[in-house]
């Protein structure tokens, strides 16, 4: 059973993952709670791999500690500045999927973050993006800080990423699935 989150439909987001068993996936900007890291670890199983990547060293340490406690060796927590191409110590063209969930709006150089995700995906791999929609919300970042969905789609198209579908991950967010060509 996946923990419930009133802001995001975690099961809906995870259902966008095309390969589940034995897959190599990454949660880019995972945060310290691992809302997606730990359910992903269960989906890919012990033969898969989940890279939990974050710029906050305390988040990386928290994920490492919890993964050890829960005996989930398929989780590898990595410190990285995702706004720098090549910074994530993950083999190029190796991931079945990468997740950017509530991460882009925080970035100074969000396009670089998308480039880094694309670099890590194998051909045919998917980038699953969930971020704050341009709708009035009782919480979340200021509207001017949110990444506009149409601009994200246009930028991704220039980076070898084709939009394959949109989905509704929650009342205040949009969800996009891109496939690496």
Image (cartoon, rainbow, N blue to C red):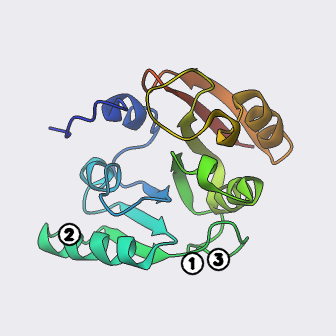
Q: Residue at x 33, y 35 (%)?
A: 10
Q: Nearer the viewer, mark 2 or mark 1?
A: 2
Residue 140 is situated, as x and y percent measured from the top left of the image, at 49, 38
Q: Position of residue 37 (x, y in %)?
A: 34, 56
The N terminus - image quarter: top left
Q: Are marks 3 and 1 in contact (CB under 8 Å)?
A: yes
Does dot 3 land on a helix, a strand or a loop? loop
Does residue 102 appear left or right of residue 109 in this picture? left
Image-based side of 12 in relation to 159, left or right: left
Front-lying residue, 32 or 28: 32
Q: Are marks 2 and 1 in contact (CB under 8 Å)?
A: no
Secondary structure at numbered mark 2 = helix
Residue name at image x 62 percent, y 47 percent: 105
Mark 3 or mark 2: which comes first in sequence? Answer: 2
Q: Residues within 10 Å of mark 3 (few under 14, many from 20)?
A: few
Residue assigned mark 2: 66
Residue beneath disc 3: 87
Residue named by callout 1:
89
**Pick the front one: 84 or 73:** 84
Closer to the chain start, of discs 2 and 1, is 2
Q: Tell me the crowding category of disc 1: few under 14, some 14 to 19, or many 20 or more residues within 10 angstroms, Cα based.
A: few
Nearer to us of marks 3 and 1 is: 3
Q: CA distance from mark 3 to mark 1?
A: 6 Å
């Amino acid at each position: 059973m996946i923990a419930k989150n009133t802001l995001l439909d975690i099961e809906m987001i995870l259902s966008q993952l095309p390969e589940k068993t034995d897959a190599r996936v990454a949660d880019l900007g995972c945060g310290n709670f691992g809302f997606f890291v730990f359910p992903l670890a269960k989906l890919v199983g012990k033969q898969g791999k989940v890279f939990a990547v974050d710029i906050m060293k305390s988040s990386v340490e928290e994920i490492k500690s919890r993964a050890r406690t829960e005996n989930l060796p398929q989780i590898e927590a990595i410190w990285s500045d995702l706004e720098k191409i090549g910074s994530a110590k993950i083999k190029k063209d190796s991931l079945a999927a990468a997740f950017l969930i509530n991460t882009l709006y925080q970035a100074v150089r969000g396009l670089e973050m998308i480039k880094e995700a694309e670099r890590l995906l194998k051909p045919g791999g998917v980038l699953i993006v969930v971020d704050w929609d341009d709708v009035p919300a009782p919480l979340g970042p200021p509207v001017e800080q949110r990444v506009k969905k149409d601009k994200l789609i246009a930028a991704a198209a220039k980076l070898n990423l084709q939009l394959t579908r949109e989905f509704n991950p929650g009342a205040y967010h949009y969800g996009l699935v891109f496939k690496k060509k």
